Amino acid sequence: MKFNPQSSKRSSIKLLSLAVLSAMTMACSDDAPKKQPERVVTVTSTKVERETIVRTVPGVGSLRAIEISTMAPEVAGNVIGRYFEDGQRVERGDILYTLDRRTQEAQLDVLQAQYEEQEWIWGRMKILAETQAASEAEVVEAAYTLESLKAQVAEQQSIVDKLTIRCPFKGRVAIHKIDVGTYANVGDELVKVVNDSVMLVDYELATMWLPLLKVGQSIEMSTDSDPGRSYSGRVTAINPFVNDSTRSVLVRAQVPNPEYALRSGLYAYVTQTIGSYPDVLVVPQASLVYTTTNELVYAVVDGRAVSVPVELVRKIDDARAIVRPVVASSSTGTSTSNTNGTSGSTKQVVIKAGLEIVAEGALKIRPGSKLKTMPYVPADVSVVTGLPSGGSAGGN
């Protein structure tokens, strides 16, 4: 076979052209933009709730028994008997103390004898007056003397009775102050008796709440002695004047104490009901996004975030908020831009009960973001401290 230089040259040129063309194709392929995967944001979501929210106002006060009586003698005397143990339950009329009353009883016996004698004289005077052996004036004078002695006997009897100290109501006696054998002067404290079947709680509220305060409103109360236990009661009085130092109003409520667990002097944390927000929309506070013009939440529609304008009415429970819908005035749709550069238009969404919204993670998304949702678990917020004591709802 004869070698052809011309043919060999053409083959070399053809191979070179193919190599250049392949290199140019590869270069053009490297310069073409690659399609990036769309970013997915993980958030927690929940549904908007419609409910009636009770309005409450907190207060701090102190407890006292509904009846507290300081037992003290009205007549001075030597204490000769004590008939109770400290802290004992007593009934109305039970004898607590007796004082020496021998002198007063002797005086009563003298007056009683004089009264009986005068009663006989008056009877004789009436008989004599019928036979005109005694004048009408003498009969009247005998009657007056009899009435005077009767009053003296009653007075002395009351003095004798006061030397026996009786319980004024059903309750409990405190620690006694005077022992047997001690001379007690008028007004000396012997012992206190308390009726602690019902407790009074006095607390002050700011005057801004005055228009909403009413007698009969319910309260919930707890104490430092047993923080986990709640007691229910009702408002019985609202002071008719305002404290000119603190500019607050004093409120009094009654709390039943059937187990006698509450004691006078305890510090009380009170939550008073002052009304309600009926049939309102409730969302987690963490779901709210604040802008320069309004507030909004993000709804989850077909796996994407859609901004929904709302109006914040009030924050409640340190974790939730009441909102109302805001309807856009001009546009009928909302333009969205995705992270992959695509754009589109979604129908306007109005907040309503049952709408799925982003609860946590709202600050890291934009309208149109693709979402991966997980259930929202609210924090367990303490009504006493206002701080979360557990749960996973932290906010962003």
Image: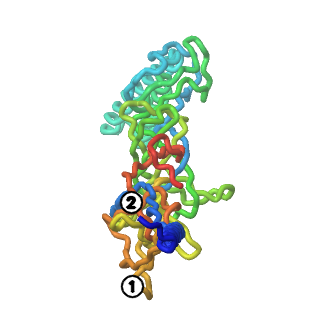
Q: Given this view, does label 2 or label 1 mark the residue nearer the observer?
A: 1
Q: Residues within 10 Å of mark 2 (few under 14, many from 20)?
A: some
- The spot of residue 215 in percent (x, y) is 43, 57
Is residue 248 shown above or below 32? Answer: above
Question: The residue tagged with tag 2: helix, strand or loop?
Answer: strand
Q: Which mark is residue 332?
A: 1
Q: Which mark is residue 53?
A: 2
Question: The residue tagged with tag 1: helix, strand or loop?
Answer: loop
Check disc 2 and give the amino acid type: Ile
- In the image shown, does 363 or 80 lie closer to the viewer? 363
- In the image shown, does 37 or 23 lie closer to the viewer? 23
- The spot of residue 237 in percent (x, y) is 47, 54
Asked whether residue 150 is in view, the answer is: no
At 42% from the left and 42% from the top, the residue drawn is 255
| Label 2 or label 1, whichever comes before in sequence order | 2
Is residue 10 shown above or below 55? Answer: below
Is residue 139 shown above or below 356? Answer: above
Check disc 1 and give the amino acid type: Thr
